[in-house]
Image (cartoon, rainbow, N blue to C red):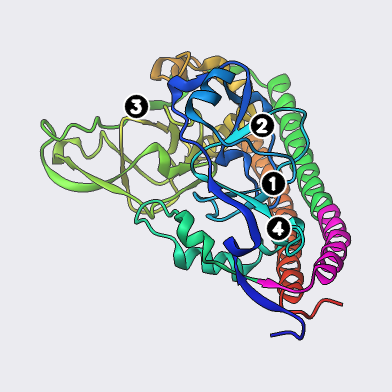
């Protein structure tokens, strides 16, 4: 233990340590006293999310005997993600309460600086202890009693304020660097999309548009019906398995498929798989030598030459990224890219030489963009690691 530091249980340095209120849907109203929920508690920051704000009336506040929270109070979410994340309530000009899954901490300011604690709550040591004290098999949560027993470092108040000032300055710089890396990544993605859009604009100018139904064979996969399906159990793809440009086979289920259905409900190398629902229009080419079965939530599109499948995949991606693809969907809530809509969907249809040239240009740009993405993601990861290293130093007494 660093000289002058001691450890304390979290609840012992507060004047208020209580859970929020149990507010049912029927208790909520369109205005009144603001209800702060776990979604408002960010990892060290308060997330206003005003567009999703919920309220209770003054009458309900009095009837339920709610605990009002104040600017400067600390809230801890007892639910993921992660469990135990904390923020300080800012001055918003609103009266506020909080939900039962948030714990309210009003610190004894003579012992604990709230900003010091919020920084500590982002450290690995804190989050590890929170995880160890959490319970639940499907969704972790921590009880208020277990949360209150979490140990925290307690240097002098002056030392706490010094550490907060150093971290404020360091994290401001890290945040700027992280924001710059994310902005550079976004710029690279925009440039790649603009290049893709320009390539296809040129294709549409030079070549006639053809309907998919006129130039390719397409069909939906087999409907999953455990009571009616017969045959051998075989692995199959769902729309969740088809990502943009790749097929994820790590999580495949099985359905019964008869021998006579094998050709009808399988995709072979070079076929394009397109999501009918879930994320309608998302597409990937099946590039493995062995065939694969697919469910009704997917379309299989088969061209006489597989080069057109790759060409269509990129064309769909461009249309989706520019929000033009949704014009072909049906449904006001859950949307679908139906077989009929797919048949009527038009794409430019150049000769094979032009298709190969266009696809090569796209993949060259994609390779460059992917390299930039890896670079910027690595930069972001390094900045996050540096952030944790600073926190580790801060709460082990090594921050100078």
For the record, the magenta segment spans 153-177
Residue 39, image x, y percentages: 58, 39
Residue at image position (40%, 46%) is 269
Q: Which residue is mark 4?
A: 108
Q: Which residue is mark 3?
A: 219
Res. 73 mark: 1
Residue at image position (41%, 15%) is 340
Q: Kindly report the secondary structure that dominates the magenta region of the rendered protein.
A: helix
Q: Earlier in the sequence, mark 4 or mark 2?
A: 2
Q: Earlier in the sequence, mark 3 or mark 4?
A: 4
Q: Tell which of 11 and 300 is nearer to you.
A: 11
38, above or below 289, in the image:
above
Q: Earlier in the sequence, mark 1 or mark 2?
A: 2
The image quarter in which residue 263 lies: top left
Q: Secondary structure at mark 2?
A: loop
Q: Which residue is mark 2?
A: 49
């Amino acid at each position: 233990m660093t000289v002058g530091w001691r450890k304390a249980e979290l609840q012992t340095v507060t004047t208020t340590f209580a859970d929020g209120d149990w507010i049912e849907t029927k208790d909520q109203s369109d205005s009144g006293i603001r209800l702060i929920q776990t979604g408002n508690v960010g990892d060290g920051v308060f997330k206003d999310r005003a567009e999703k704000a919920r309220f209770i009336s003054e009458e309900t506040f009095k009837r339920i005997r709610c605990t009002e929270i104040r600017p400067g109070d600390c809230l801890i979410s007892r639910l993921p993600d992660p469990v135990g994340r904390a923020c300080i309530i800012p001055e918003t000009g609103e009266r506020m309460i909080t939900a039962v899954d948030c714990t309210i901490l009003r610190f004894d300011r003579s012992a604990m600086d709230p900003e010091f604690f919020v920084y500590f709550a982002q450290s690995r040591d804190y989050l590890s202890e929170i995880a160890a004290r959490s319970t639940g098999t499907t969704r972790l949560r921590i009880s208020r009693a277990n949360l209150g027993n979490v140990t925290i470092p307690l240097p002098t108040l002056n030392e706490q304020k010094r550490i907060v000032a150093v971290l404020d300055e360091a994290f401001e710089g890290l945040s700027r660097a992280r924001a710059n890396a994310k902005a550079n990544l976004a710029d690279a993605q925009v440039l790649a999309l603009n290049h893709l859009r320009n390539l296809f604009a040129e294709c549409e100018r030079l070549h006639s548009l053809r309907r998919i139904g006129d130039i390719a064979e397409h069909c939906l996969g087999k409907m999953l019906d455990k009571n009616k399906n017969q045959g051998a159990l075989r692995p199959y793809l769902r729309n969740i398995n088809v990502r943009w440009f790749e097929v994820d086979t790590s999580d495949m289920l099985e359905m019964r498929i008869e021998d006579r259905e094998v050709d009808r409900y399988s995709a072979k190398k070079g076929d394009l798989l397109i999501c009918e629902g879930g994320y309608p229009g998302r597409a990937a080419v099946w590039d493995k030598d062995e065939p694969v079965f697919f469910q009704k939530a997917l379309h299989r599109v088969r061209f006489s030459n597989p080069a057109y499948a790759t060409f269509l995949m990129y064309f769909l991606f461009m249309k989706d990224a520019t929000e033009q693809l949704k014009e072909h969907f049906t449904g006001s809530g859950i949307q679908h890219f139906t077989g009929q809509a797919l048949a009527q969907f038009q794409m430019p249809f150049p000769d094979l030489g032009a298709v190969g040239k266009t696809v090569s240009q796209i993949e060259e740009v994609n390779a460059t963009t992917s390299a930039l993405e890896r670079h910027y993601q690595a930069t972001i990861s390094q900045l996050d690691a540096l952030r944790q290293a600073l926190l580790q130093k801060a709460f082990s007494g090594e921050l100078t």
